[in-house]
Image: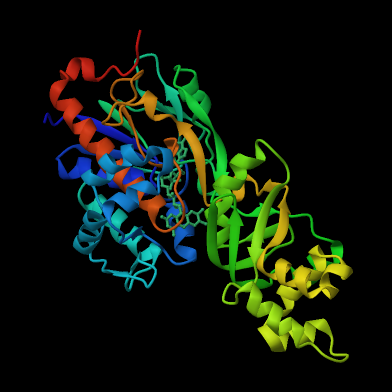
Amino acid sequence: MKNETRVAVIGGGPAGLMAATVLNKAGLAVDIFDTKASAGCKFLVAGRGGLNLTHSEPAAIFASRYGNNAEIFQKILAGFSPHDLCAWLRELGVETFIGSSGRVFPKDATAHDILKIWVETLGRCGVAFHYQHRWQGFSQAGAPLFLAETGEILEFPATALLLALGGASWPQTGSDGNWVPILAAWGIQLAPFRPTNCGVEVTWSEHFRTHFSGKPLKNVLLRCGDQQASGDIMITAHGLEGGPVYALSALIRDRLEETCPVPLFLDLKRDLPQERILEKLAQRRGKESLANFLRKAIHLTGPAYSLLRETCSPEELKNPMALAGHLKNLLIPISKTRPLAEAISSAGGITFAEVTPDLMLRNLPGVFVAGEMLDWEAPTGGYLLQGAFSTGYLAARGLLKWLKTTPPTTARLFLPN
Ligand SMILES: Cc1cc2nc3c(=O)[nH]c(=O)nc-3n(C[C@H](O)[C@H](O)[C@H](O)COP(=O)(O)OP(=O)(O)OC[C@H]3O[C@@H](n4cnc5c(N)ncnc54)[C@H](O)[C@@H]3O)c2cc1C
């Protein structure tokens, strides 16, 4: 490959950094641009709750987590698999371990440690980092334009471009979807951004909100339509948060587009069958309060009991049959999902119809795209980071292939006349 080839990677998140790693290894001069003052801001946020890097489950099940895009991701993941990710991390000096749920985490390193080693390694290998450079679009000659911190508009003479600008959740990390109008102006089809892996809104009474926000509901089972998820969830001022809620949030979001509210059912005692609960309720005697009785007889915690009181009528609470039914199948009407800005990830962005199998924009030859700016979604469990890493890898490999087959003179022109 010619030495004068310069590639601009725009977006220094996991997808952009992985792409830069591949391009740098191939001997290209790589410049990374990011609007923030440092790389990987969202990666650092992901590290706050325990950095779940990927998952250890078999490839076909892994790919199925990408829903409608499972077939596309089967190919993407074959190029850079969870196994490849762990092997690459080991090269970087980061060991991983598989948790009891099959999720993969770094062994003795934080997100901050990994990012530091990664950025330092890239820097040592000659990758140039340009922070506080916000991509603005293209010059007349087809070169990327940046708004620098100084207020200047700078043009960068890149031979090819790789965009990894992220989705649109947690805009404070730099991924704010600001690039949408730029690409839309070039006729690229974009699906609207929507929250995914997010909390849901429930209209609580003032009393319940004040007293139970921040309290957990332990080991519950949530059901919506034909999907279910279990684990601990959190009562919040706005509704409910937590892993099982996030797992159902895409389905709830889609259903809310057709009907409101969407019924969510909670099993507050998933370890006890309804008949067993009924037997226990039949033993209630004397003047003992219901709260006390339920705590002793079926180990129902304070927040769970209060949720029953919040959602059931006094008559239903007095009726053992109705009460047992509610304990196993408590209806919570969901009025909204939490806003996109709060979601762990976003659905929407560049549709796969707009890119070649190598992730090059069909309308803008020489411009490759990767990461959450593509229109895919997946649950939590390491699928989001793996998706970012694998698409970053694939787009970089595609870019290398494109450079080999494209004469350097035409390679400079991304833009159609
Ligand atoms: C709270 C939270 C927890 C998470 N936990 C996990 C987890 O445990 N496991 C998991 O798999 N995933 C997790 N994720 C999701 C994961 O962090 C993202 O999927 C991943 O960071 C996406 O990578 P990306 O490179 O596509 O985009 P991003 O990481 O969003 O990076 C995009 C970059 O582009 C830059 N940029 C945007 N616009 C411009 C512009 N115009 N010019 C220049 N630069 C620009 C941004 O500043 C940013 O640095 C979590 C996310 C959140 C918010």
| Colour approach in the figure | rainbow
Residue found 28% across the figure and 36% down from its top: 395
Looking at this view, name the residue that lies furthest to the bottom.
286
Q: What is the tally of numbered marks visible in this picture?
A: 0
Residue found 72% across the figure and 72% down from its top: 324
* 314 on left or right of 136: right
In the rendered image, the vertical position of residue 378 relative to residue 148, given as above or below: below
In the rendered image, the vertical position of residue 195 relative to residue 296, given as above or below: above
Looking at this view, name the residue that lies furthest to the top.
417
Q: Position of residue 317 (x, y in %)?
A: 82, 72
Nearer to us in this view, 328 or 389:
328
Nearer to us in this view, 200 or 7:
200
Residue found 74% across the figure and 61% down from its top: 237
Can residue 182 be seen by looking at this rendering?
A: yes
* 366 on left or right of 350: left
Q: Position of residue 353 (x, y in %)?
A: 38, 25
Residue found 29% across the figure and 47% down from its top: 18
In the rendered image, the vertical position of residue 316 relative to residue 386, given as above or below: below
